[in-house]
Amino acid sequence: MTDQTRLSWTDVRDEIRARILNRTYAPGDRLPRDEDIAQEFGCARTTVHRAMQDLSQTGLVERKRRGGTHVLSDPVTRATFDIPITRREVEQRGSKYDYQLIRRSVELTPLTIMARFGITSAIKMLRVKALHLADNRPYIFEDRWIDLRSTPAIMEVDLTRQSANEWLVHNKPYSRLDVRFSAMSAEGESARFLEAPEGSALFVIERTTWIGTAPITTVQAIAAPGYQLAAQS
Amino acid sequence: MTDQTRLSWTDVRDEIRARILNRTYAPGDRLPRDEDIAQEFGCARTTVHRAMQDLSQTGLVERKRRGGTHVLSDPVTRATFDIPITRREVEQRGSKYDYQLIRRSVELTPLTIMARFGITSAIKMLRVKALHLADNRPYIFEDRWIDLRSTPAIMEVDLTRQSANEWLVHNKPYSRLDVRFSAMSAEGESARFLEAPEGSALFVIERTTWIGTAPITTVQAIAAPGYQLAAQS
DNA sequence: AAGATTAATATGTAGCTACATATTTATGTC
DNA sequence: GACATAAATATGTAGCTACATATTAATCTT
């Protein structure tokens, strides 16, 4: 892009990647030292280092001090997913977003919820069930638990007007996150609120957040039939 | 870790993140220039730059030349998932891995497959249906299409002994990847091979790869009931 | 030969400089 | 005032140096 004379670290990365792809450097092989590669390319070691860091993050090579850089023989597929606020997700698809509070109660945490947070004794938390709609049709049904010790302010929020999802994202940053995906059959509440036939397959996103070691919230978000989640390229 | 006198870029990142979390820098705010932050912390601008790059990648701030660094007001949840070779996945759980070829044929691509690859005319591809087992129980049922133009060598592979999944990972690196997750109901083949009750909810991973713009393979991997995918922290 | 110690070495990190690049802001022209 | 042009400015990138750190290889004890 600039002078042909100057290489950028992305150029180096791409060339090394190409060599791995075409087996110049085969799986398991040890790559030349950064310094030698730098000399070959006529660039600084820092540039090669940056390129290598990137390849390492991508999961294509493994680097060890003194041990050198090796091409991984069992590469994993690594994909990144963005899970936006539901409102945003709906609006970005060009649909009208609506939200509806279904229930709000203070309950003792059952074992499944305690397990998600990794706590050993049951405590009272705020439980919120709500429905997100896209173009007046059910989109996501969420069943959420919020720890009142870390997030007492949630009690003052009017959850008929604003989703807990949105309030939390804007007001309660987290330091640790656990995300899981799975599938479940529509039954009972989920079928009813999502207007899905009993037994149809639903996509489930489970998200739990902490601030430090203190639980904030855990939510099971059940998507209406047909929901698909795509990786950010 | 080192002298207390020297800050690492991760320290800077953590402190900036903390300030964002505690609203010292509120959503939408513009952060001080890298140079000013560097001065405040008593470190070099490069160090701040590295920290900022990281926060930018995480999706916490947005950087623009001349425009400065802004705290994003609508943070997305960003999670990374590792999808290993199925053999490895099974073995890592401490289970015995087995594999079984169900069918191997050369067929004309239907519209759904053409759509996945983004091609407009039907061509003949190798179609492979196979079952992965963990401890002698069905684990993943896969329905795969392989483009013989980019990967003719697959015709010589004995797919009764080695899964196409494994052969491809080890022999056919890709340059572009698309991953999607969804849910589907067990029916017909998927129910039969996974020994799942008709209508039970199954987790589906759809993966398509290209080398350059040439299609390599697309696979619909259907997991047995109970499958869960967790983010890499 | 086994185990402990020391040296060698490849990557990791931080600081500095210099310049590139994208945007915004200011200025000039009609 | 509208539009084009020029200056200012914050981030992006590359190169250099110096030193830290982890880990392997070599060496020395016993």
Image (spheres, coloured by chain):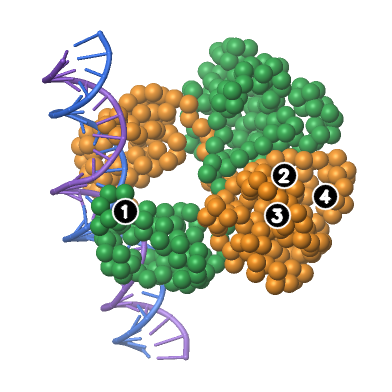
Chain colours: A green, B orange, C purple, D blue
Residue on which disc 4 sits: B190
Q: Residues within 10 Å of mark 4 (few under 14, many from 20)?
A: many
Q: Which amino acid type is shown beneath numbered disc 4?
A: Ser
Q: Residue drawn at (58%, 15%), measured in percent from left and top?
A: A162
Q: Residue drawn at (39%, 57%), measured in percent from left and top?
A: A13
Please identify the quarter of the rendering in which residue A46 is found. Answer: bottom left
Chain ID of residue with mark 1: A
Q: Using the image as rendered, state which of residue A47 and residue B43 is in the foreground.
A: A47
Please identify the quarter of the rendering in which residue C11 is found. Answer: bottom left
Please identify the quarter of the rendering in which residue B202 is found. Answer: top right
Mark 4: secondary structure: helix
Q: Residue drawn at (32%, 26%), measured in percent from left and top?
A: B30
Tell if the residue under mark 1 belongs to the same chain as the one under mark 2.
no
Q: Position of residue A212 (x, y in %)?
A: 48, 36
Frontmost of labels 3 and 1 is 3
Residue A50 numbered mark, or none: none
Residue on which disc 2 sits: B112
Q: Which amino acid type is shown beneath numbered disc 2?
A: Thr
Residue on which disc 1 sits: A8
For residue A8, side relative to residue B189 (left or right): left
Chain ID of residue with mark 3: B
Q: Which amino acid type is shown beneath numbered disc 1?
A: Ser
Q: Is residue A141 above or below residue D21?
A: above
Residue A139 can be seen in this image: yes
Which is more N-terminal, label 3 or label 4?
A: 3
Q: Is residue B3 above or below residue A74?
A: above
Chain ID of residue with mark 4: B
Q: Confirm or deny contact between disc 1 and disc 2 (CB under 8 A).
A: no
Residue on which disc 3 sits: B123
Mark 1: secondary structure: loop
Mark 3: secondary structure: loop
